Image: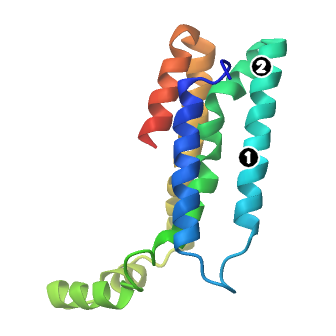
Amino acid sequence: MNALKRIDFLFFIYLASSTVLLLLTWAPGVYSPVFIWIRVLMLSFIFGLIYLNNKLAKPVTELFRYSYPLLMCGYFYSETVYYNKLFFSNLDPLLAHIEIAIFKIQPSIEFSAHLSNKLFSELMYFAYFSFYLLILIFTLYVFLKKRDDFKQITFQMSASL
């Protein structure tokens, strides 16, 4: 299909790789076939978006056509938690033991004991969440202000994430 762009190939490679990882780490009763259906829906959405962009060629379809991998990063990031047992079992006890050996305390427990302020916690959550907002704001800024560079910049951002 000549309508496919390099950002599509990048996304399809990631989608295939992450699907293989999901299948390799599959544990009955823990994982659900929903993961596979979500991928089927993503592919349907992407091919529909490509078709729509080729037929309409409007700015809003172009925006979604080239930034959909960025929009889906939030989902894929939340999915990475399922890959943690691909090569090792739960490493948390080992890491906690190493922290105690180095610091003679459990840093996360001490940190929360000394900074157990709700406002501070909310600011930390917001700072963490703002990563998603930065991606969205930056993408819109480039689309609105630097349209000539939009395709290249969204590809680079997608590849880096």
* Image x and y of residue 58, in percent: 79, 13
Among numbered discs 2 and 1, the one appearing first in the sequence = 1
* Image x and y of residue 51, in percent: 80, 24
Residue density around tag 1, few if under 14, some if 14–19, many if 20 or more, within 10 Å: some
Residue shown at 72%/74% (left/top)? 32
The reply, left or right, for residue 108 in relation to residue 39 is: left
* Image x and y of residue 95, in percent: 29, 84
Position of residue 54 relative to residue 156, above or below, is above
Numbered mark located on residue 4 in the image: none
Q: CA distance from mark 2 to mark 1?
A: 16 Å
Residue at label 1? 42
Mark 2: secondary structure: helix
In the rendered picture of this protein, how many numbered marks are placed on residues?
2
Q: Quadrant of residue 96?
A: bottom left
Asked whether residue 119 is in view, the answer is no
Mark 1: secondary structure: helix
The furthest residue to the top: 148
90 and 137: which is toward the camera: 90
Residue shown at 78%/12% (left/top)? 57
Residue at label 2? 53
Asked whether residue 67 is in view, the answer is yes
The reply, left or right, for residue 32 in relation to residue 152 is: right
